[in-house]
Amino acid sequence: MKESYNWILNRLPYTEPFLFVNEILHVDAKGAEGTYRFSPDADFYKGHFKNNPVTPGVILTECCAQIGLVCLGIYLLGKKSEIGNMAIGMSSSQMEFLQPVFPGERVKVVSELVYFRFQKIKCEVKMYNEDDKLVCKGVLAGMIGIANE
């Protein structure tokens, strides 16, 4: 039986139109894997670029961060953590973009934990398209934890 990660999805601090996680395929103490399909109707396609829309790199980075960093961080904090007090912030990103992602495409993000200590999380992330071609890769870091009142 496939494990349900709905408890992680329900704790994500994002909603449409800024939610870039459809499904978590796997998560453990070493990393996370999930998918997202970019809606052809997303507003950012209207101006990026005229007559040839592609997904902006900042949106690809955000998708990688939501799946690879935040979903993993929520998992590492555990089911018993108080999500109402969760604090999240990106502290650094180094991304390399190799392939365009077009409207309607489904991507898979795979992250590998570098470390999680003192509420700081750092991961190596890779994004693949439906043809299993590497779209982008990099290192993302941020703060995730339970905020003090």
Image (spheres, rainbow, N blue to C red):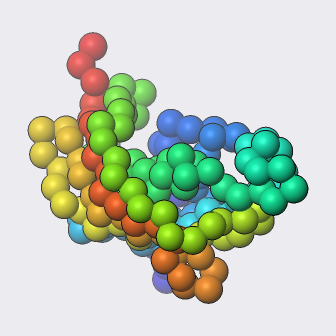
Q: Position of residue 8 (x, y in %)?
A: 46, 52
Residue at image location 30% in from the left, 37% down from the top:
91
Q: Position of residue 23 (x, y in %)?
A: 57, 64
Residue 91 vs 62, above or below: the answer is: above
Residue at image location 76% in from the left, 62% down from the top:
103
**Quarter of the image containing the C terminus?**
top left
Residue 112 vs 76, above or below: the answer is: below
Residue 129 at least partly seen: yes
Foreground residue among 77 and 136: 136
Foreground residue among 23 and 94: 94
Residue projecting furthest to the right: 51
Residue projecting furthest to the left: 118
Q: Position of residue 10 (x, y in %)?
A: 53, 46
Q: For this view, does 137 lie left or right of residue 81?
A: right
- Residue 75 quadrant: bottom left
Residue at image location 48% in from the left, 63% down from the top:
97
Q: For this view, does 81 lie left or right of residue 54?
A: left
Q: For this view, does 120 lie left or right of residue 32?
A: left
Residue projecting furthest to the bottom: 131
Residue 7 at least partly seen: no
Picture mark count? 0
Residue projecting furthest to the top: 149
